[in-house]
Image (cartoon, rainbow, N blue to C red):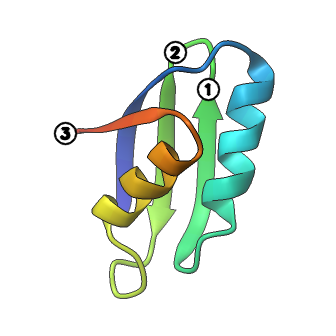
Amino acid sequence: MSQAFEIKGMSCGGCATRLMRVIGRMNGVKTVKVEFETASMAVDYDPDAVSVAQIVAKTEETGYEAKPVD
């Protein structure tokens, strides 16, 4: 399954790299791409192992806001 997110709170490319590393380590996340320039994140994940709510919560724990985009 794939989900796009709008990310708020990133101030540099290092923020995107950090968020990509943290989300990428989550159980059930297959791939993640974070783009600082567009303030976006795309996550491919296994819905049986991780939920959108868990991805949002982990993003917020890392210091950023994540809003799922349809």
Q: Which residue is at the front of the view, 29 or 60?
A: 60
Residue at 73%, 14% in the rendered image: 12
10 Å crowding of disc 3: few (<14), some (14-19), many (20+): few
Asked if the residues shown at circle 3 and circle 1 are in contact, with their CB atoms under 8 angstroms apart, the answer is no
Name the residue that disc number 2 marks.
Answer: 38
Q: Is residue 4 above or below residue 44?
A: above
10 Å crowding of disc 1: few (<14), some (14-19), many (20+): some
Name the residue that disc number 3 marks.
Answer: 70
3 or 2: tag closer to the N-terminus: 2
Q: CA distance from mark 2 to mark 1?
A: 6 Å
Query: Residue 22 location, x and y as percent?
Result: 68, 55
Asked if the residues shown at circle 2 and circle 1 are in contact, with their CB atoms under 8 angstroms apart, the answer is yes
Q: Is residue 16 left or right of residue 39?
A: right
Residue at 52%, 15% in the rendered image: 38
Res 20 label: none
Residue found farthest to the left: 70
Query: Residue 69 location, x and y as percent?
Result: 25, 36
Q: CA distance from mark 3 to mark 2?
A: 16 Å
Q: Secondary structure at mark 1?
A: strand
The kind of residue on which mark 2 rests is Thr
Q: Which residue is at the front of the view, 44 or 22?
A: 22
Q: Is residue 70 left or right of residue 6?
A: left
The kind of residue on which mark 3 rests is Asp
Q: Is residue 26 above or below residue 67?
A: below
Q: Quadrant of the N terminus?
A: bottom left
Q: Which residue is at the front of the view, 38 or 67?
A: 67
Q: Quadrant of the C terminus?
A: top left
Image label count: 3
Q: Secondary structure at mark 2?
A: loop
Q: Secondary structure at mark 3?
A: loop
Res 35 label: 1
Task: Determine the image quadrant of residue 67.
Answer: top left
